[in-house]
Amino acid sequence: MNQPEFTAGLNIAMKIPKAQYEATVVFYRDTLGFDVKEEDVSYAPTVSTTHSVRFGPNTLWLDCVDNYSQPDLWLQLHTDDLDAATATLAGTGIRPCDEVEPLHNLESRTHWIKNPAGVVHLLAESG
């Protein structure tokens, strides 16, 4: 089996309860003055609205999740070989948890995983 390479992705998703969503968008857009844009969210059925925020070299996604009671932060990882990465992670007890947010019509192969502390990561095959 190939040893996969892992690299950090440029996307960070903040899953925000509906009751706190508008105030959070206002904070990044109006208070901090960041470039905030509403985006299409049809690929993620658990997200009702999303805005992208230029956050230095990263994109911070503000995702409104109607059934959340507290915010959650999700990160992105890339790998050159999704199958080898999945096998390597399984050897450490980390298994895909794609049920956390079904994704449709993406340009790359992906899996959702959680680190040992329970933080969700989108593992995407690059290339």
Image (spheres, rainbow, N blue to C red):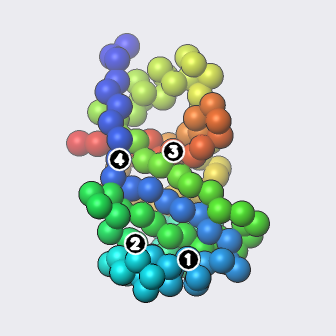
Q: Mark 4 points at which residue?
A: 9
**Tag on residue 24?**
1
Residue 36: quarter of image: bottom left
Q: How far apart are marks 4 and 3 (CA)?
A: 10 Å
Mark 4 surroundings within 10 Å by alpha-carbon count, few (fewer than 14), some (14 through 19), many (20 or more): some
Q: Are marks 4 and 3 in contact (CB under 8 Å)?
A: no
Q: Position of residue 51 (x, y in %)?
A: 45, 76
Residue type, numbered disc 2: Ser
Q: Which of marks 4 and 1 is nearer the N terminus?
A: 4
Q: What residue type is labelled 3?
A: His
Q: Please state which of residues 9 and 113 is positioned toward the viewer in this rendering.
A: 9
Q: Which of 91 and 73 is in front in this view?
A: 73
> Which mark is first along the chain, 2 or 4?
4
Give the label on residue 121, or none. Answer: 3
Q: Check disc 3 and report its element: helix, strand or loop.
A: strand
Write the residue at 70% across / 80% down.
Answer: 19
Q: What element carries label 4?
A: strand
**Looking at numbered disc 1 in the image, what kind of residue is underneath it?**
Thr
Report if residue 125 is visible in the image: no
Choose top left, top right, bottom left or bottom right for residue 114: top right
Figure check: 56 above or below 3: below
What element does badge 1 sit on? helix
Mark 1 or mark 3, which is nearer to you?
1
Q: Tell me where residue 54 appears, x and y as whole percent.
A: 32, 69
Q: Distance between the residues labelled 4 and 1?
A: 23 Å
In this view, 109 is above or below 34? above
Which residue position is annotated with label 2? Answer: 52
Residue 33 is left or right of residue 69, and the answer is left
Question: Pointer 2: residues within 10 angstroms few (<14), some, or many (20+)?
Answer: many
Q: What residue type is labelled 4?
A: Gly
Q: How many marks?
A: 4
Q: Pinpoint residue 41: horizontal percent, then vertical percent.
A: 48, 74
